[in-house]
């Protein structure tokens, strides 16, 4: 009996610490990521009007959308290593303030060259945010809870579509020519400012580690630190150089590349796909965009909860990837022949892709810790996000060449199928995580 009381007494501070950490970090980081993703892909809505005003072809738009990820790729690993050295609070604040300013500057774009330059600078400014947050969460949440936490955090991608779509559509339609500015100029300005404001709030809200968290009691800090230290100590010791060359890390980078091909195929082309499905008014396009993202949000939460409850990662990642492939291909094949069916297929595809994303991150975070985690996670994310350059550029060139997004969607579907196959190879017959 005394042992049970002791165990319960030990567990109680741990449970309180977990609950407090969730309340403290998840909602705030969620808002940060909503703004990050919105500032990254709102160019997809701007293109509905900006393309005609500035005479941008689909290839110019696709290349500009993708150039973001070149700057992102080049600075991703260095940025995450700086974050580990100087602390998440100051570095995430710097990232958000910088990208918010750059995003607002897009209102001055007047040529393909200025569009390309600002997209590159925006990617460089945002580099390190997402892997930095993933690394930061490993300092607060143990692996058995992490898939659910990461899923809640990454639901921000879906919410940015649910909120950002209608808001972007309204700005494009109702603020066009207000004070002499076009709707797409207002879109960039108004959606960039919140990132600067929230970036300043980061300085007063985030803590660099458990020791500096004054919202935890001494026994809660001790219980949480012991749990995290025990998990990190049980992982394979690995230097940064070894982590960056480890075949498992490189395989994960390839898997993530294939998933992200689908993500940004949807992220940058969803407004165009909805328009091709028969919805023409910009405000209506914005409102309809919320549907696939709403379904995706539910799928992310359900899949993350189910995976944690069952302790199973493999099939929880493979099945959504396959649904994502089927959905994007079906939506392009249906097109304007049946608007409702096309939107339903887009919803299935979006849900599958979004559900796969947080579940993927349960794999590398279960393998790496310390400096290897900071560098390895950044490497996986930076390489994977090169798909953000390939995907929109490829779809844009295919659309210009064929007049249709069909073959582009075929290519994205094939990438998602390859991701599922690689997960099966990587995890073999054992559960990942």
Image (cartoon, rainbow, N blue to C red):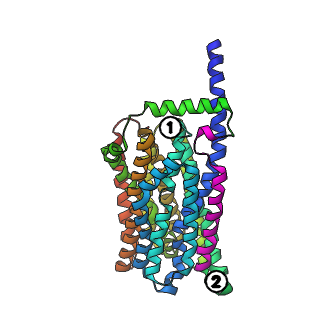
Residue 166 in view in this figure: no
Determine the CA span between mark 2 and mark 1: 48 Å
> What residue appears at the point 69 percent right and 33 percent down from the top-left corner?
217
* Dominant secondary-structure state across the stretch colored magenta: helix
Pick the residue in front: 389 or 131. 131
> How many neighbours does mark 2 have within 10 angstroms: few (below 14), some (14-19), or many (20 or more)?
some
Where residue 336 appears, as percent x and y from the top left, is: 49, 75
Is 200 contained in the magenta span?
Answer: yes
SS under mark 2: loop
Residue 176 is tagged as 2
Name above or below for residue 186 compared with residue 225. below
Pointer 2 with pointer 1, Cβ within 8 A = no
Q: Residue furthest top?
A: 1
Residue 143 is tagged as 1
> What residue appears at the point 63 percent right and 43 percent down from the top-left corner?
22
Name above or below for residue 249 compared with residue 271. above
Q: Give the magenta-colored segment's residue range.
A: 184-213
Where residue 147 appears, as percent x and y from the top left, is: 52, 43
- Indicate left or right for 63 with 202 as reference: left
């Amino acid at each position: 009996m005394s042992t049970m009381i002791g165990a319960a007494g030990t567990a109680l501070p741990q449970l309180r610490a977990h609950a407090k950490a969730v309340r403290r970090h998840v909602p705030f980081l969620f808002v940060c990521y909503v703004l990050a993703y919105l500032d990254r892909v709102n160019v997809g809505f701007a293109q509905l009007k900006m393309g005609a005003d500035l005479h941008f072809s689909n290839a110019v738009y696709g290349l500009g959308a993708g150039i973001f990820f070149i700057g992102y790729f080049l600075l991703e690993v260095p940025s995450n290593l700086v974050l580990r050295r100087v602390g998440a609070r100051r570095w995430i604040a710097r990232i958000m303030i910088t990208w918010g300013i750059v995003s607002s500057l897009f209102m001055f774009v007047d040529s393909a060259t200025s569009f390309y330059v600002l997209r590159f600078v925006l990617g460089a400014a945002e580099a390190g945010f997402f892997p930095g947050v993933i690394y930061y969460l490993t300092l607060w949440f143990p692996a058995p809870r992490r898939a659910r936490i990461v899923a809640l955090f990454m639901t921000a991608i879906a919410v940015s579509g649910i909120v950002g779509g209608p808001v972007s559509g309204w700005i494009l339609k109702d603020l066009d020519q207000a004070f002499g500015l076009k709707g797409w100029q207002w879109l960039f300005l108004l959606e960039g400012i919140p990132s600067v404001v929230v970036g300043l709030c980061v300085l007063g809200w985030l803590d660099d580690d458990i020791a500096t968290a004054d919202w935890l009691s001494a026994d809660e800090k001790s219980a949480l630190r012991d749990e995290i230290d025990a998990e990190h100590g049980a992982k394979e010791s690995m230097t940064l150089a070894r982590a960056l060359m480890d075949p498992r890390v490189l395989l994960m980078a390839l898997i993530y590349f294939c998933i992200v091909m689908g993500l940004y195929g949807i992220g940058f082309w969803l407004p165009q796909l909805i328009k091709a499905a028969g919805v023409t008014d910009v405000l209506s396009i914005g409102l309809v965009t919320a549907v696939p993202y709403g379904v995706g949000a539910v799928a992310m939460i359900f899949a993350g909860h189910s995976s944690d409850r069952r302790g199973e990662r493999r099939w929880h990642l493979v099945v959504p990837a396959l649904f994502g492939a089927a959905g994007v291909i079906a939506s392009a094949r249906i097109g304007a022949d049946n608007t409702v069916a096309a939107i339903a297929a887009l919803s299935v595809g979006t849900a599958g892709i979004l559900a796969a994303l947080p579940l993927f991150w349960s794999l590398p975070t279960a393998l790496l810790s310390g400096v290897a985690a900071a560098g390895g996670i950044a490497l996986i994310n930076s390489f994977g996000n090169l798909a953000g350059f390939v995907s929109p550029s490829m779809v844009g060139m295919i659309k210009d060449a064929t007049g249709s997004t069909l073959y582009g969607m075929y290519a994205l579907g094939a990438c998602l199928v390859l991701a599922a196959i690689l997960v099966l190879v990587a995890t073999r017959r054992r559960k990942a995580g």
